[in-house]
DNA sequence: CTGTATCCTGTAGGATACTG
DNA sequence: CAGTATCCTACAGGATACAG
């Protein structure tokens, strides 16, 4: 599975469409799931990997770096041995949660209707 | 700009994550914007092109076909000359609107904060 | 007006292997 | 544990041209 967001010649964040502005943040494969996982509680790298089973380390790493660069998540290295790293949502990240929840809500509803 | 959704070996709609289920519907470049445009009122092909200025006819067409196949939009050919076609959201499509609105809301908020 | 058919390209992201 | 480095491929989607 994968979700990509590609920039085109025209900015995703068109002046007239606020959707692009937000999609820039939650675009990219697994991004909504990452935020969803972090919404409940801060998590470590390996925990996120487990949350999203088939995600590759590379992609998870990439996503986390992107989100960190965008100010959506924070990365905190715990001085333990072996080292562990905690990722958490920033305030900006929390603003995205309602949107993710709306998406998850629809998904949940669809799955219920879909059969089981 | 562009938004892609790619299927991987693992179903996007994982049993444990409802997000994938919903993202399957609004994945793909421009898909959220298409639904957003149709949310207000049914629209014709060329109107949608105008709404999303830089979208190519091919992609818009592709998106609309996908959404139609998924039961998100309906396509109605009006027997006029020249022919015009009206696209509208189905009931399923309307279920997606709150999620899109949540996304748009965040986007709008971010843009306001972002400067102007 | 409403598309469809081609062609072409970048790039996202999966696999795998390796590091501190 | 928490990544990074490569390599590789599929495929999304942009342009363009044409069609009913």
Image (spheres, coloured by chain):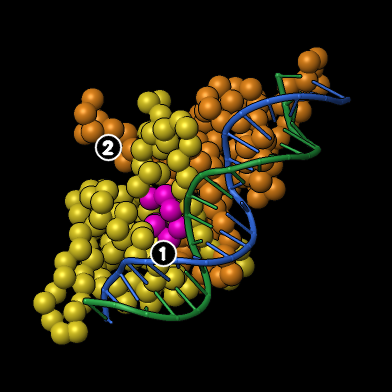
Chain colours: A orange, B yellow, C blue, D green
Query: Position of C16 compared to B59: left or right?
Result: right
Q: Which residue is mark 2?
A: A110
In the picture as drawn, the residue positioned furthest to the left comes out as B79
Distance between the alpha carbons at the discs numbered 1 and 2: 26 Å
Secondary structure found at label 2: helix
Vertical position of residue A83 compared to residue A29: above or below: above
Please tell me the numbered disc located at residue B110. Answer: none
For disc 1, the chain is B
Horizontal and vertical percent position of residue B7: 45, 40
Nearest the camera: A107 or B30?
B30
For disc 2, the chain is A
Both marks 1 and 2 on one chain: no
Horizontal and vertical percent position of residue C2: 26, 73
**Residue plotted at (27% across, 37% down):** A110
Vertical position of residue D6 compared to residue B116: above or below: above
Q: Quadrant of the C terminus of chain A?
A: top left
Asked whether the viewer can see residue B102, the reply is no
Q: Which residue is mark 1?
A: B59
**Residue plotted at (34% across, 71% down):** B48
**In front: label 1 or label 2:** 1
**Residue plotted at (65% across, 30% down):** A57
Asked whether the viewer can see residue B85, the reply is yes
Secondary structure found at label 1: helix
Label 2 CA crowd tier, 10 Å (few <14, some 14–19, many 20+): some
Give the extent of the magenta segment.
B26-32
Residue B99 part of the magenta-drawn span: no
Vertical position of residue B36 compared to residue C12: above or below: below
Query: Position of A90 compared to B1: left or right?
Result: right
Horizontal and vertical percent position of residue A63: 62, 41
Query: Position of B67 compared to A28: left or right?
Result: left
**Residue plotted at (28% across, 33% down):** A111
């Amino acid at each position: 599975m994968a979700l990509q967001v590609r920039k085109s010649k025209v900015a995703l964040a068109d002046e007239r469409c606020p959707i692009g502005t937000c999609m820039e943040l939650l675009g990219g494969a697994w991004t909504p799931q990452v935020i969803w996982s972090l919404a409940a509680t801060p998590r470590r790298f390996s925990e996120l990997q487990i949350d999203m089973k088939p995600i590759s380390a590379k992609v998870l790493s990439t996503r986390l770096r992107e989100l960190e660069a965008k100010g959506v998540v924070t990365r905190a290295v715990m001085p333990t041995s072996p080292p562990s790293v905690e990722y958490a949502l920033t305030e900006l990240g929390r603003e995205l949660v309602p949107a993710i929840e709306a998406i998850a809500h629809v998904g949940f509803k669809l799955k219920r209707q879909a059969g089981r």
